[in-house]
Amino acid sequence: MSKTLFEKIWEKHVVRQLDGGPAVLYIDRHFIHEVTSPQAFKGLEQRGLPVFRPKQVVATADHNVPTVDQHLPIKEALSRIQVEQLHENCAKYGIELYGLGHPFQGIVHVIGPELGVTQPGMTIVCGDSHTSTHGAFGAIAFGIGTSEVEMVLATQCLLQSKPKTMRINVEGDLGTGVTAKDIILYVIAQISASGATGYFVEYAGSAIRKLSMEARMTICNMSIEMGARGGMIAPDETTFAYLQGRDFAPKGEAWDAQLAYWKTLYSDTDARFDLELHFKAEDIEPMVTYGTNPGMGIAVTAAVPAEETLAEKDLPAYRKALEYMGLQAGKAIQGQKIDYVFIGSCTNSRIEDLRQVAALVAGKQKAPGVEVWVVPGSKQVEEQARREGLDKIFEAAGFNLRQPGCSACLGMNEDKIPAGKYCISTSNRNFEGRQGPNARTLLASPLTAAAAALTGEVSDVRNL
Amino acid sequence: MSKAIQYIKSSAVPLAAENVDTDQIIPARFLKATSRDGFGKNLFRDWRYFNDDEGQPKSDFILNNPVFKGKILLAGKNFGCGSSREHAAWSIKDYGFDVVVSSFFADIFKNNALNNFLLPVQVSDAFLQTLFAAVQANPQTEIEVDLEKQSIALPGGEQETFDINSYKKTCLLNGYDDLDFLLSIKPEIEAFEKTF
Ligand code: SF4
């Protein structure tokens, strides 16, 4: 019987199917970080349980860490306590930790792939919704809550109901200045922030196949922003080339054996999906959001939707969003003044993102009055950027290259956007208060963010 | 905190907003605790207070309206989207709700709620509007939620049944959690690993 990629991996990991209920799903890799794990460890302790398979768990500190002076103790007491607890818990249970100061430290969804821990065909979980990022390798990867973190620590299993499957096909060639981030912002704008709820999404089509691994991760990362349980892309030569030689990728004969298996991981030609959607790459322009959920996005050349274009019942929420954002219905988004530029987060903080930005801004200067933060996704990305001299380019442009972490993606660490200020951000969420109380977030690609850094306003990168 | 849920009859708090994300339910800066308790006081923090100051409540926010109280939270479509933080479920439960009713729940939130004995009741859009109208017209209206029968009803007799998978239903009715179950099949998990 023909199967989807999702079904192939899912079925291989079912330990037991409960009648009329969920499946017991075996988990290959479990990533943990300081924010969603302390209560799980506390739960284990209360029940007197060990960690069942500590070798299958990898930990890092990312959400709460400062992105300057990482060699100094964390100033904020509660953040410091969470990070210290992670250290203690990992030491106690024999879990590998890439904490502050470690050459592998970084955002959990950046380091997993970069180290080769993330591989095709795996089931991967983390107490973080953007775990969907790892699906770019053809893995079933999804975010879980803290009670579930505790379950995986204790049994390496989860109870999961099988989601419905959706395939999103994007065919054709992207125009210049249009990136993977624009694809996903476009798709979410088309189907809304809840358009894929209940589904596990596979991205396919010629436009997806042509993307690099970094770009594929950007797309899978934001699957959750349309409500999907996760997103995935079938592994291919691009995937294998990326993985080969990475620290934790299989080597020698083990590599050959795995490779042969990975090559079986695709949706069969006549596999059936519960829903299929089709988009054309040519229709996609550089995107930017104007509202307070990631589905509220438009082409950078467009105007904030006029009220007449909305259904009556959607108007109150729409007005509330625009009021929060301080934007006007019907007005062009280009030219909107920007105070902060944040280039970072697990969506767009990989070396390719930094290279793209550097190529655009080399020899240029940021606009006066704009604060620009470039926050690499990991220590390895930071080092690589320095080796390539990108740090010099950023410095000359007046950009502030910081140390790895989640940074201004969420208002949890020291990097916050002040109330009322406009931040064009390469992260994944523009919810009210996400980047700090009353901060105003416009999501965009690294190129569009960099363009705004140079002009001080929302700009079409294709005109620079 | 594990506690069985069988039958709840209570007035409700009508939160008429759609796409309520977990960043609103519990803003990130309150996620720094290392225990599960005490999150209720920060539930909807930024919607409840001006400038983070408990002395300055926003009087138009529904949780600050003394007329509405109860163990049931009525919410608009796509409740609990966004971040996977289980703190969202903890804060709702800790605040004193046992049931959240919406016409749609985000997946991770739904799981988190179930794992914390907070019952997510998914009803049709039309019935949700009926519930909102009834509670807004008379804040004392008591809604009955019967998990055994999988029904939700208004005093006037309007009612609807809701879905819940049979495994989860047994867990909630009996106060078991997933981990109890998984631990009970550990030998089977170990056997599975060998064939893998
Ligand atoms: S970068 Fe942002 S979205 Fe990604 S893991 Fe960190 S906080 Fe979450």
Image (cartoon, grey):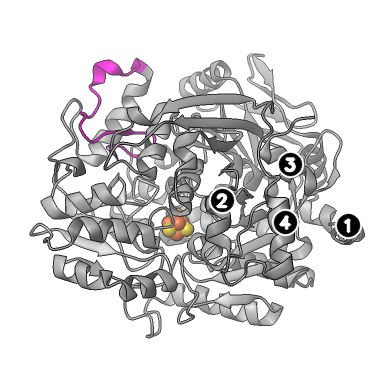
Coordinates of residue A42 in the picture (x, y in percent): 67, 70
Mark 4: amino acid? Ile
Mark 1: amino acid? Thr
Mark 2 belongs to chain: A
The answer to whether residue A204 is left or right of residue A454 is right
Q: Secondary structure at mark 3?
A: helix
| Residue annotated with mark 4 | A27
> Pointer 4: residues within 10 angstroms few (<14), some, or many (20+)?
many
Mark 4 belongs to chain: A
Q: Which mark is residue A8?
A: 3
Circles 2 and 3 on the same subunit: yes
| Residue annotated with mark 1 | B195
User: Would residue A35 be counted in the magenta stretch?
Assistant: no
User: Magenta stretch?
Assistant: A290-312
**Could you tell me which residue is drawn at 45 percent across and 82 percent down?**
A101
Question: Is tag 4's residue or tag 3's residue first in the polypeptide sequence?
Answer: 3
Q: Distance of mark 4 from mark 1, alpha carbons?
A: 14 Å
In the picture, the quarter occupied by the N terminus of chain B is bottom right
Instruction: Name the one closer to the observer, A241 or B89.
Output: A241
Question: Is tag 2's residue or tag 3's residue first in the polypeptide sequence?
Answer: 3
Circles 3 and 1 on the same subunit: no
**Could you tell me which residue is drawn at 36 percent across and 49 percent down?**
B46
Coordinates of residue B127 in the picture (x, y in percent): 58, 18
Q: Distance of mark 3 from mark 1, alpha carbons?
A: 16 Å
Q: Between label 1 and label 2, give the one nearer the viewer.
A: 2
Q: Residue furthest bottom?
A: A72
| Residue annotated with mark 2 | A237
Circles 1 and 2 on the same subunit: no
The answer to whether residue A152 is left or right of residue A344 is right
Q: Main secondary structure of the magenta part?
A: loop
Instruction: Name the one closer to the observer, B36 or A394.
Output: A394
Q: Distance of mark 2 from mark 4, alpha carbons?
A: 25 Å
